[in-house]
Amino acid sequence: MSENDLIQNVQQTQKEFELALDVAKDAEAIEALRIQYLGRKGCVADLFKSLSTIPSENRKAAGQALNQLKTNLQTALDKKFDNVKNINTSVNEFDVTMPGNWPDFGRLHPLTKVTREIKQIFSNMGFGVADGPEVESEYYNFEALNIPQGHPARDMQDTLFIDEGFVLRTHTSPVQIRTMESKQPPLRIISPGRCYRRDTPDASHSPMFHQVEGLCVDQGITFADLKGVIQNFAQQLFGSDVKIRFRPSFFPFVEPGAEYDFTCLICRGQGCRVCKGTGWVEISGAGMVNPKVFEHVGYDPEKYTGFAFGMGIERIAMLLYGINDIRLFFENDIRFLQQF
Ligand code: PHE
């Protein structure tokens, strides 16, 4: 064999090897190729044998080509073997204890949950649920509630006015009027819903917030009934050791009127940041329905008495869940919402 023939053979072997390696898909096939090409009786060994038939002064180029071929094959086999091994190991070492990919579940918003609980408690006490519009006429939001024109409660600072004569309701109290217009006593309703005030958002203010209105009208209803209902509610929601207190206050649609507080559940009355060290958290206002309101809806104030109360739903949710910033309810950060 001439040196050139041998070099051609070397090139041919390299090509055949590459094709064969390409289709070798597992470690066994690669090992078979290694034996076929680099084994003691393999093609490369044969080529080395034919090298010895070439006169030694003509062997240099063929010898180099042959050595190169051997190295090439060796490297290519090693590389392919590593690839196959990696694929196999990743399959073999699959960790069955790894957590799976969980789909995200929807949840009830904390305000929805609290509102449902509030409805349930009052429904157990015989209260129905009433509803009213969020865009409300000035008549229902103010006038009929004995808040005449020029009253400070109508101040531009607080109220978001829409068109002439219409506002975004600043409280749920207009539902009192709408209910009394359409029903005769005795009646017992609550009305949860959104309210709006021109407040700059901070930890305890939001221009949109939620209230529950409560109204009970019948013959012989007294302030003691109001206190009993509020006390019962507070204890059902927060547990039997929660205390309530009423402080005299003024709302044009009740007389006498009060603001009422619950013991702070975050510090259990010891005094903390949420209750500003007082041990009490203000919930809202309440009182006996003002006879002037009864006159607006055509009830006989000589015959009937009633109580009404408001309730800030965010405040209750903050107490219940230990949340110290009202804005968290409306940012809808999934990390916050997932906790409920
Ligand atoms: N509507 C009052 C407010 O938003 C609360 C209230 C309701 C007071 C019912 C008395 C009776 O501040």
Image: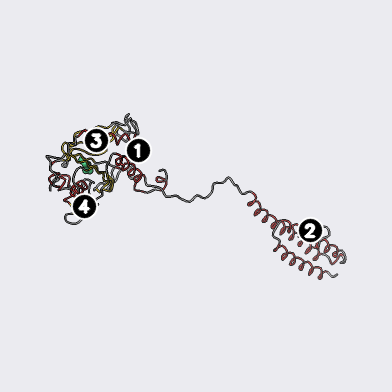
The residue singled out by tag 3 in the image is: 260
* Dots 3, 4 in contact, CB < 8 A: no
Residue on which the image places disc 1: 320
Instruction: Kindly check if marks 2 and 1 are in contact, taking CB atoms under 8 A apart as contact.
Output: no
- Disc with the residue nearer the chain's start (2 vs 1): 2
Mark toward the start of the polypeptide (3 vs 2): 2
- Asked whether mark 2 lies closer than 8 Å to ligand 1, one says no
Label 2 Cα neighbours within 10 Å, binned few <14 / some 14-19 / many ≥20: few
Question: Disc 4 designates what residue?
Answer: 136
**Upstream in sequence: badge 4 or badge 1:** 4
Name the quarter where the N terminus is drawn: bottom right
| Of the image marks 3 and 4, the number of the one nearer the N terminus | 4
Labels 4 & 1 near each other (Cβ < 8 A): no
Q: Nearer the viewer, residue 19 or 227?
A: 227
Q: Position of residue 230 (x, y in %)?
A: 26, 36
Question: Who is closer to the viewer here, 253 or 15?
Answer: 253
Q: Amino acid at mark 1?
A: Leu
Q: Is residue 92 above or below residue 308?
A: below
Label 3 to label 2: alpha-carbon separation: 92 Å
Q: Amino acid at mark 3?
A: Tyr
Q: Mark 2 is on which residue type? A: Ile
Q: Residue at x 70, y 56 (%)?
A: 81
SS state under label 3: strand
Query: Element type at marker 2?
Result: helix
Q: Residue at x 27, y 32 (%)?
A: 244
| Amino acid beneath label 4 | Glu
